[in-house]
């Protein structure tokens, strides 16, 4: 009994006296504010959840609510609930300046700065009084984004990555932030994001240990980069400004959020479906057109024998001709010198 | 070998030396155009073949980016194709209608010439072979250009119109054409850089510059030395008699200088 008391006291002692002071009023569940918009904003703070949050033993109320120093609180007017949240938007910056700065480069902030109040603030993803580590468990990240990006989440959930995460609790697969980053989320519709996207896929798909687990090749990026599309993408990436034309990147053939295993009959790169993918950029492509792409294989006597033997022929023929000509030149020079 | 070392000692004497016509205006224009197109094709094609190399990326960005480079390459390729078709068309027509005697056709003599000449280099025979209008090296280069050009044109068109080609032919032809186009292009470049530049510029016999394909003229002395059979034919038909007279009418000192090794 004494032990239980000690633990309860210990938990209560974690909250600073200042917090206890605020909680005198704010632990009242019915405490709320009615805004001019007609919406009501609950002012209840769950002391247990705050104590259990990552900030519970570090911060007191006034660290974030810097505008409130005395009681009664100074008069503040908020038109609606969103404005209430926006008023505290910059509170996190005092400690998390690096992530705050990064978020200024995000597509979310771009919308926010244009006055779109739907754009997420720190608290929308991380929570306010109940901030916890965002990575635990990993699925939390995807479900967090899903609160706004529901359709994308549904497609992701059905993808080879999403299924492994959600149904297999697999930690190897990417969640939203692995590709899009977390604070400096770039607009994925730009040409520069498209052209850099193979690098994103490469982060995992060139990792020998991870790919081995799933029997996947780590050569897919290299075989892409040395072919026409990959070569073009590499050049476009170096060029200044937006290129006039598009060239296929990983996601154009494999899909973006709906990537399926290549063995999946519904996969866009499955032999039966791949001509349709080619036709997106190559109108009039017939069923024999996809064979122009060696499906990430190196030419060999089994895969693409014609390509393999043409390559082999020139690997022998070029040195043969060049050495023959050089030899004749050297013999000629030698004859000229000897005859002098 | 004393004849082989003969060369004029100054530009003034070169200008005064008697000349015969070797190339027609059309041939000179053809060479000039193909030279320009070859340089343009190599300049825009090789960096695409070696796109991973730093120099290739530098060159492509200097030329205005990959799209511009490909555009230039295709335009030059179309012009090359048109030029080759015109050249071969005219030659075949003239040869079939017996208006010209084709002089680039390889003969059995070309093979024995090669053996004799190589034997001479090795010290097995006294003289190199006596050549007609074109020696075996020049024929090799000409037919290399024709066959190599044909491969480049066909594979280039396959790469230009992949969707059209795969309507009737298997898709694997496209990557095979890509390998062939790049490799054949590299081979052509190496032959020109090594073999053609040597024979037209660096060889002690012509150093620094065999200008006859640009001026259309060849010194009678050089014709006697490098194309004795053609010279003999021209003499027999009386076409160079006037030139010979002109040569003997010149001040004696000039001729002596020209004969010195």
Image (spheres, helix red, strand yellow):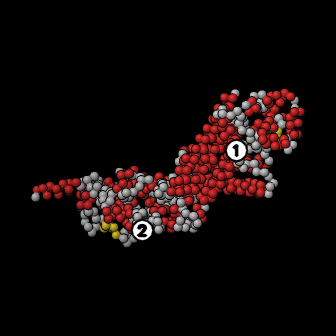
Q: Nearer the viewer, residue A271 or A306?
A: A306
Q: Nearer the viewer, residue B44 or A196?
A: B44
- Residue A265 - label: 2
Q: Quadrant of residue A123?
A: bottom left
- Residue A313 visible in the current orientation: yes
Above/below status of B52 relative to B258: below
Q: Residue furthest bottom?
A: A38
Mark 1 lies on a secondary structure that is helix
Task: Tell whether B134 sits left or right of A324.
Answer: right
Task: Tell whether B150 sits left or right of A97.
Answer: right
Label 1 crowding class (10 Å Cα cut-off): few <14, some 14-19, many 20+? many
* Spatial separation of the CA atoms under disc 1 and disc 2: 62 Å
Residue marked by disc 1: B110
Task: Tell whether A46 sits left or right of A39.
Answer: left
At horizontal 59% and vertical 41% (from top left) the residue drawn is A323
Mark 2 lies on a secondary structure that is loop
**Quadrant holding the N terminus of chain B:** top right
At horizontal 64% and vertical 51% (from top left) the residue drawn is B148
Return the x and y of residue A147 as percentages of the image width and height: 37, 66
Task: Tell whether A312 sits left or right of B194.
Answer: left
Return the x and y of residue B250 as percentages of the image width and height: 87, 32
At horizontal 51% and vertical 52% (from top left) the residue drawn is A226
Return the x and y of residue A169 as percentages of the image width and height: 31, 61
- Residue A123 visible in the current orientation: no
């Amino acid at each position: 009994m004494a032990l239980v008391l000690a633990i309860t006291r210990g938990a209560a002692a974690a909250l600073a006296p200042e917090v206890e002071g605020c909680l005198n009023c704010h632990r009242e569940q019915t405490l709320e504010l009615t805004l001019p918009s007609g919406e009501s904003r609950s002012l209840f703070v769950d002391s247990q959840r705050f104590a259990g949050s990552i900030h519970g033993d570090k911060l007191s109320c006034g660290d974030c609510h810097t505008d409130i120093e005395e009681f009664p609180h100074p008069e503040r007017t908020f038109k609606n609930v969103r404005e209430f949240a926006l008023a505290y938007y910059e509170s996190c910056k005092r400690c998390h300046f690096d992530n705050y700065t990064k978020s200024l480069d995000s597509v979310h902030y771009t919308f926010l700065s244009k006055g779109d109040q739907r754009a997420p603030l720190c608290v929308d993803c991380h929570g306010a009084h109940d901030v916890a580590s965002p990575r635990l468990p990993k699925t939390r990240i995807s479900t967090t984004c899903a609160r706004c990006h529901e359709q994308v989440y549904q497609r992701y959930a059905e993808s080879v990555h999403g299924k492994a995460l959600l149904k297999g609790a697999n930690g190897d697969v990417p969640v939203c932030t692995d590709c899009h980053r977390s604070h400096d989320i770039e607009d994925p519709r730009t040409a520069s994001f498209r052209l850099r996207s193979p690098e994103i896929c490469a982060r995992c798909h060139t990792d020998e240990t991870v790919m081995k687990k799933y029997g996947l090749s780590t050569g897919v990026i290299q075989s892409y980069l040395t072919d026409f599309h990959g070569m073009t993408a590499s050049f476009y990436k170096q060029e200044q400004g937006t290129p006039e034309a598009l060239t296929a990147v990983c996601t154009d053939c494999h899909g973006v959020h709906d990537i399926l295993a290549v063995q999946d009959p519904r996969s866009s790169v499955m032999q039966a479906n791949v001509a349709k993918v080619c036709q997106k950029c190559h109108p009039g492509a017939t069923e024999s057109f996809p064979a122009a792409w060696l499906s990430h294989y190196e030419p060999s006597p089994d895969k693409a024998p014609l390509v393999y033997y043409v390559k082999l022929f020139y690997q022998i023929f070029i040195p043969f001709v060049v050495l023959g000509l050089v030899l004749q030149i050297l013999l000629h020079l030698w004859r000229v010198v000897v005859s002098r | 070998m004393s004849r082989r070392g003969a060369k004029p000692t100054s530009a003034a004497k070169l200008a005064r030396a008697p000349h015969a016509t070797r190339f027609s205006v059309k041939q000179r224009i053809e060479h000039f155009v193909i030279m320009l197109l070859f340089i343009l094709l190599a300049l825009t094609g090789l960096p695409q073949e070696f796109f991973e190399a730093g120099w290739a990326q530098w060159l492509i960005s200097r030329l205005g980016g990959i799209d511009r480079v490909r555009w230039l390459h295709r335009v030059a390729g179309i012009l090359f194709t048109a030029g080759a078709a015109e050249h071969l068309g005219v030659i075949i027509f003239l040869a079939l209608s017996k208006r010209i005697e084709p002089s680039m056709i390889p003969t059995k003599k070309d093979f024995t010439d090669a053996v004799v000449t190589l034997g001479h280099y090795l010290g097995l025979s006294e003289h190199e072979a006596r050549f007609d209008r074109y020696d075996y090296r020049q024929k090799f280069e000409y037919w290399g250009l024709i066959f190599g050009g044909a491969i480049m044109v066909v594979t280039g068109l396959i790469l230009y119109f992949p969707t059209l080609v795969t309507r009737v032919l298997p898709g694997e032809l496209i990557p095979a054409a890509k390998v062939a186009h790049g490799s054949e292009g590299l081979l052509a470049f190496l032959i020109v850089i090594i073999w053609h530049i040597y024979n037209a510029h660096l060889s002690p016999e012509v150093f620094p510059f065999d200008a006859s394909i640009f001026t259309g003229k060849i010194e009678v002395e050089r014709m006697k030395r490098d194309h004795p059979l053609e010279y003999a034919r021209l003499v027999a038909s009386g076409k160079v008699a006037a030139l010979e007279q002109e040569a003997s009418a010149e001040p004696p000192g000039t001729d002596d200088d020209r004969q010195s090794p």
